[in-house]
Image (cartoon, grey):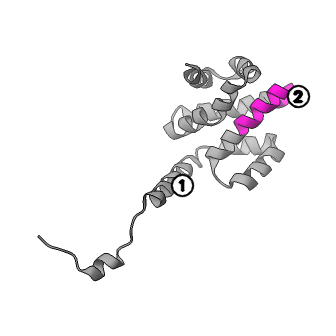
Amino acid sequence: MKTRKASTVAKSPAKSPARSSVNATARAAGDSAPRLRTVNSYLEKNFPDFFAEARFQVGDDDYFLYARFGQYLARTIELNRVSRDKINRGFTVLNKMARVSARHPRIRQMMVSGPLEYIVDAPKARALARKRLSPVAQGYMESLCE
């Protein structure tokens, strides 16, 4: 059996589990970023204040951006804070995301565990989502309700 020299072992970098999970998260966010470019630009155009604040707080992480957007949308529906037009544009963002997620499982997982989770937890938002979301997005939402 061959053994490695102590100097070779000392020079080799140690892989820590925390470091590899950070890299996996960065890869997952990086893989979905080009596919979400049109959704991001629509979100930025229609919700500029939210988009700027969220990007400042979470950086380039799309998962947290859309999770916060779901929280924002559910909260505004529950508290009747914005116009119906703005709420409809919020559902358009989710419908665009659902269209992209039909081909990309990571984006689907991001949508289900992010914005739809907050909408399912808010009764008014859930009722309105049943009317406004596309069939694909409603299917994702119904899978959360089961």
Looking at the picture, which amino acid does disc 2 mark?
Ser
Per the image, the residue denoted by label 2 is 83
Callout 1: helix, strand or loop? helix
Q: Is residue 89 left or right of residue 17?
A: right
Per the image, the residue denoted by label 1 is 26
The reply to whether the magenta stretch includes residue 85 is: yes
The reply to whether the magenta stretch includes residue 104 is: no
Looking at the picture, which amino acid does disc 1 mark?
Ala
Magenta stretch, main secondary structure, is helix
Q: Residue furthest bottom?
A: 7
Mark 1 burial class by Cα count in 10 Å: few <14, some 14-19, many 20+: few
Name the residue at 72% across, 36% down. 71
Q: Position of residue 36 (x, y in %)?
A: 62, 43
Counting residues from the start of the chain, the first of labels 2 and 1 encountered is 1
Q: Position of residue 115 (x, y in %)?
A: 66, 34
Q: Position of residue 76 (x, y in %)?
A: 82, 31
Q: Position of residue 121 (x, y in %)?
A: 68, 26
Residue numbers of the magenta segment:
69-86
Q: Residue furthest left?
A: 1
Name the residue at 71% across, 41% down. 68
Q: Is residue 86 left or right of residue 40?
A: right
Would residue 37 be seen by someone viewing this image from the given angle?
no
Q: Which image quarter is the N terminus in?
A: bottom left
Callout 2: helix, strand or loop? loop
